[in-house]
Image (cartoon, rainbow, N blue to C red):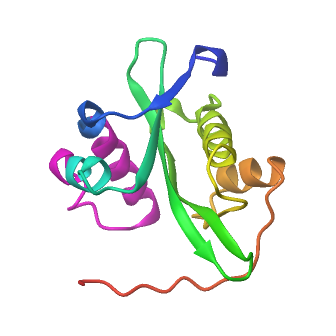
Amino acid sequence: MSQSDLTVRAARPRDAAEIARLSRELNQVVGDSTEHCTPENIKTTLFGHDASFHVLVAAAADGEPIGYAVWHAYYDSGHGGAGAWLAEVCVGKAGRGEGAGRALFEAVVEDVRESPATFLMWTSSETEAAEALYESSGGFAKPVRRWELNGL
């Protein structure tokens, strides 16, 4: 498979099972919980009537999703206004190394350019492939600490 065999499109609720499967793969790699990676939770969280997420999927030539990206509106006073937060870019094992991550990232950037946002921020799981993609796309790393407050 090559990047020309990929299609990036808006995700739909019927993609929830594949997004859940890909999310489980991602969370296993980074050591996060997988118990919430269910089609039901994906449908409710990403596609519910009050969801504010923009979800894209990268699909192989056969239409099967091999990756997804999620972004949402974000505010940062340091930038003086509206921006976007890239929550996840995930490519499943079968699609890695084929350009799906780059295609998804570039599609997110294009979506954000068409929104009121003037910047895009994200964190990375610090895999070599992710770091190389973000650096080659013109991104730069800033030292941050990741804080969490769970169980709310």
Hey, which quadrant is residue 27 in on the image?
bottom left
In the depicted structure, whether residue 8 falls above or below residue 138: above
Hey, which quadrant is residue 124 in on the image?
bottom right
Image quadrant containing the C terminus: bottom left
Q: Position of residue 6 (x, y in %)?
A: 56, 20
In the depicted structure, whether residue 101 falls above or below residue 64: below
Magenta-drawn segment: 18-41
Q: Nearer the viewer, residue 81 or 27?
A: 81
Q: Position of residue 132 (x, y in %)?
A: 76, 51
Asked whether residue 63 is drawn in magenta, I would say: no
Q: Position of residue 48 (x, y in %)?
A: 24, 51
Q: Is residue 5 left or right of residue 47?
A: right
| Residue at 62% in and 28% down | 98
Looking at this view, name the residue that lies furthest to the left: 40
Q: Nearer the viewer, residue 148 or 9?
A: 9
Image quadrant containing the N terminus: top right
| Residue at 32% in and 51% down | 46
Hey, which quadrant is residue 86 in on the image?
bottom right
Q: Position of residue 38 (x, y in %)?
A: 20, 50
> Count the marks: how many?
0
In the depicted structure, whether residue 121 falls above or below residue 147: above
